Image (cartoon, helix red, strand yellow):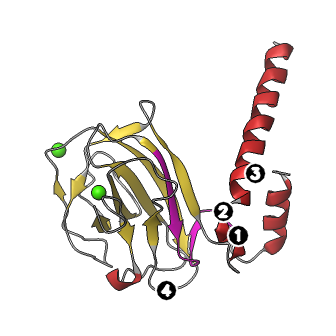
């Protein structure tokens, strides 16, 4: 068993080195707020959770966007818990450079998000607001959130066959839940973990 553990640690170190290599060509590191800005990334594959997505509606800052059930079901998806550091309009944009899913949808929910009824409690849905068939919430959408509240961002494929890697960039006022926005000390120690 110990040998297996050593193998696992070696694999994790290799994976960590690969991640550090990617970060070196990430020009977002040049931005002053890179430390607090959320980059939400992952992979949708056969092991990902699925749901029967909803669509439509318009932006509702009262969490009442009128989404309707799609006849297309079983989309692979990933859920991110996010918060904001101010009440300015947010941006959440699927990055075409780092995303291999050919058609995404993205939905922003207030807390709670009910995976069994994704028509409920939504702020906004977007299909193709980004590059090509990729999704984006941009400043012009006027999505302003409340600091201290919890929100859920659901990234999914347009249909159940859409899978692959994704990376989502956000405006500097969007952070993942539990992230510390202004504590540069914790950011430095986090980076140290990957050296
Ligand atoms: Ca359905
Ligand atoms: Ca799309």
- Res. 190 image quadrant: bottom right
Q: Secondary structure at mark 2?
A: loop
Q: Earlier in the sequence, mark 3 or mark 2?
A: 3
- Residue visible at 81% across and 30% down? 9
- Residue visible at 19% across and 69% down? 57
| Camera-nearest label, 4 or 3 | 3
Mark on residue 20? 3
Report x, y in % for residue 29.
Answer: 70, 69
Q: Earlier in the sequence, mark 4 or mark 2?
A: 2
- Asked whether, in this view, residue 86 is left or right of residue 18, the answer is left
Pick the front one: 128 or 152: 128
**Rendered view: 103 above or below 122:** above
- Residue visible at 35% across and 49% down? 102
| Camera-nearest label, 4 or 2 | 2
Q: Is residue 176 magenta?
A: yes
**Rendered view: 82 above or below 165:** below
User: Disc 1 versus disc 4: distance between alpha carbons?
Assistant: 24 Å
What residue is pinned by disc 1?
Answer: 29
Q: Earlier in the sequence, mark 4 or mark 3?
A: 3
User: Disc 1 versus disc 3: distance between alpha carbons?
Assistant: 12 Å
- Tell me whether circle 4 and circle 2 mark residues in contact (CB < 8 Å): no
What residue is pinned by disc 4?
Answer: 87
What residue is pinned by disc 2?
Answer: 26
Q: Is residue 169 magenta?
A: yes
- Circle 1 crowding by C-alpha within 10 Å: few under 14, some 14–19, many from 20: few
Q: Earlier in the sequence, mark 1 or mark 4?
A: 1
User: Disc 4 versus disc 3: distance between alpha carbons?
Assistant: 32 Å
Highlighted range, magenta: 165-179
Give the position of the N terminus as an image quadrant: top right
Point out the quarter of the image occupied by ligand 1.
top left
- Tell me whether circle 3 and circle 2 mark residues in contact (CB < 8 Å): no
């Amino acid at each position: 068993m110990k040998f297996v553990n050593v193998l696992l640690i070696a694999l994790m170190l290799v994976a960590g080195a690969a991640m550090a290599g990617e970060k070196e060509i990430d020009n977002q590191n040049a931005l002053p707020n890179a430390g607090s800005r959320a980059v939400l990334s992952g992979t949708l594959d056969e092991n990902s959770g699925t749901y029967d997505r909803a669509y439509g509606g318009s932006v509702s800052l009262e969490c009442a966007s009128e989404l309707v059930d799609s006849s297309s079901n079983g989309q692979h998806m990933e859920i991110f818990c996010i918060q904001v550091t101010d009440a300015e309009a947010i941006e959440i944009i699927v990055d075409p450079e780092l995303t291999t899913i050919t058609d995404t949808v993205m939905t922003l929910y207030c807390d709670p998000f009910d995976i069994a009824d994704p028509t409920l409690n939504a702020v906004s849905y977007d299909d193709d607001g980004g590059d090509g068939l990729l999704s984006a919430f941009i400043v012009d959408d006027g999505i302003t959130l409340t600091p201290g509240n919890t929100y859920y961002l659901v990234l999914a494929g347009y249909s159940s066959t859409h899978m692959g890697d994704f990376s989502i960039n956000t405006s500097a006022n969007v952070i993942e839940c539990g992230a510390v926005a202004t504590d540069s000390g914790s950011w430095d120690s986090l980076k140290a973990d990957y050296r």
